[in-house]
Amino acid sequence: MSRSAHPAGPRHADVLPEGHYSAPPTDLNALDRKVWAQTVTRDDDGVVSVGGVGVGRIAEEFGTPAYVLDEADFRARARAWRTAFGEDADVFYAGKAFLSRAVVRWLAEEGLNLDVCSGGELATALSGGMPAERIAFHGNNKSVAEITRAVEAGVGRIVLDSFQEIARVAHVAQSLGTRQKVQIRITVGVEAHTHEFIATAHEDQKFGIPLAGGQAAEAVRRALQLDGLELIGIHSHIGSQIFDMSGFEVAAHRVVGLLKDIRDEHGVELPEIDLGGGLGIAYTSDDDPREPHEIAKALTEIVGRECEAARLRTPRISVEPGRAIVGPTAFTLYEVGTIKPLEGLRTYVSVDGGMSDNIRTALYDAEYSVALVSRVSDAEPMLARVVGKHCESGDIVVRDTFLPADLAPGDLIAVPATGAYCRSMASNYNHVLRPPVVAVQDGEARVIVRRETEEDLLRLDVG
Ligand SMILES: *Cc1c(COP(=O)(O)O)cnc(C)c1O
């Protein structure tokens, strides 16, 4: 399977790769707790509900497709991260996973901090009421206007990503008569994804300043000299959808090594270390993510051990989970449109959304689950591919899955674990209108991001 993008236009169907899908589940009506939001249940009438609200009612009131977000689950996960790391650490929610003003308010109330990586995310964070000092500003190419806005707002930290940015932020802060707290993002040569990591990865990426070749040490030297900057720590982010902690172990070892070099050269012990995000979630029943308290324990121990060995005071740790908080809390509700059985191959099930509301399958070959949620069925399982309504053969939502053979147009199906990187990466391809985000809790449903309208589309098109 190609993992790269392909030119616009049709892509020929691939032959089913062997072992790409598992055997059909024993019970197609069962909902695996691992992949569904906490309050999701199948009611006595066979209809799935979340937050005490049935999917039929959601579809009727808000239409489909819709992202349905379990507010209690979101708050519980945010709180679990906060509690797991305790008072000596900071949890920054990575806003790029999904950001709206309601979410910002929940995070502020639950005691989390917030990462943003553009002027738009910063505006949303401030508008949602996150105190500026709890905001961190990321990005490899922040504009001077964005930097100025962030410094003026008083963000708690800017994560410096390049040599140019060290100078830019220092200049902006100085001309505003202030000193900006900053971290330096370094690349430590560790790349981690799911169950594997590479400790000798090329630092061949756009983010961060390489540890190799003394570049990170040089960046620290410059930052320490500039009046406009207060260097508070070193930042490292090693990948995404990570299940194995050993990549963090190597990364922490290398970051602490740099802290030690800084102490030896400059006589300063930087007070903070940020280990980034990237903690994995369950998209299918095959995934086994770790609980926040296990992750907190592992990371705290690793950093403690490394610092003890280097005879450094243990710095304050921060982490930046995005997907691990919001990912599991939402599912996408679709209505089945057309169904095309292909004898001996599979059945194509088309839904009323697709790659414009979930680009991850097309972009990364991401795997998802799906279930019939508007009723139960005792029909045989059929091998299915859930596809969207876009003019693109690669418009796939769930590549290989099983759905009941009596699936019919008008049925509602739901794809779980779409809270992260779905709405936030949504597009208007084919001028399809981006779905709303509906938050549910205690029997009530309300829109927190409304559905796009044709008016919204045409407002940008000035004719
Ligand atoms: C994307 C990103 C995160 C969040 O990643 P998740 O996989 O959503 O946890 C955290 N920190 C940085 C710097 C990132 O770029």
Image: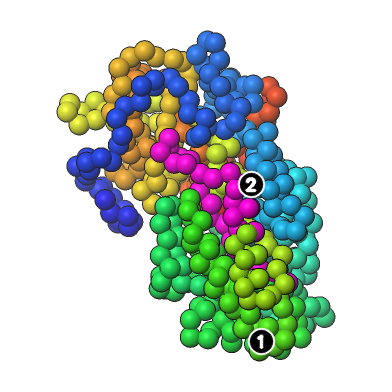
* Residue 15: percent from left, percent from top: 19, 42
Q: Which mark is residue 293?
A: 2
Q: How many marks?
A: 2
Q: Is residue 9 visible?
A: yes
Q: Give residue 254's quadrant in the image.
A: bottom right
User: Mark 1 packing: few (<14 Cα in 10 Å), some, or many (20+)?
Assistant: few
Can you identify the residue that label 1 sits on?
Answer: 264
Secondary structure character of the magenta stretch overall = loop
Q: Amino acid at mark 1?
A: Asp
Task: Please give the name of the residue rendered at 43% of the width and 47% of the height, measured from the top-left corner.
Answer: 359
First in sequence: mark 2 vs mark 1: 1
406 horizontally vs 253: left or right:
left
State the SS at label 2: helix
Give the distance between the C-alpha atoms of the residues marked 2 and 1, in whole angstroms.
Answer: 34 Å
How far across and how far down the image is residue 327, in percent? 55, 43
**In the depicted structure, whether residue 105 falls above or below residue 266:** above
Most extreme residue toward the top, as rendered?
A: 45
Q: Is residue 280 magenta?
A: yes
- Comparing 382 with 245, the one in front is 245
- Magenta range is 271-300
> Image quadrant of ligand 1?
bottom right
Q: Is residue 459 visible?
A: no
Q: In percent of the image, x 39 and y 14: which residue is there?
A: 377
Residue at left offset 62%, top offset 22%: 53
Where does residue 332 sit, x and y in percent of width and height?
Answer: 50, 34
In screen coordinates, is 251 left or right of 203?
Answer: right
Classify 179 as above or below 295: below
x and y, in percent, of residue 252 in the image: 57, 67
Residue at x-position 67% and y-position 43%:
80
* Amino acid carrying mark 2 in the image: His
Of residues 229 and 333, which is closer to you in this image?
229
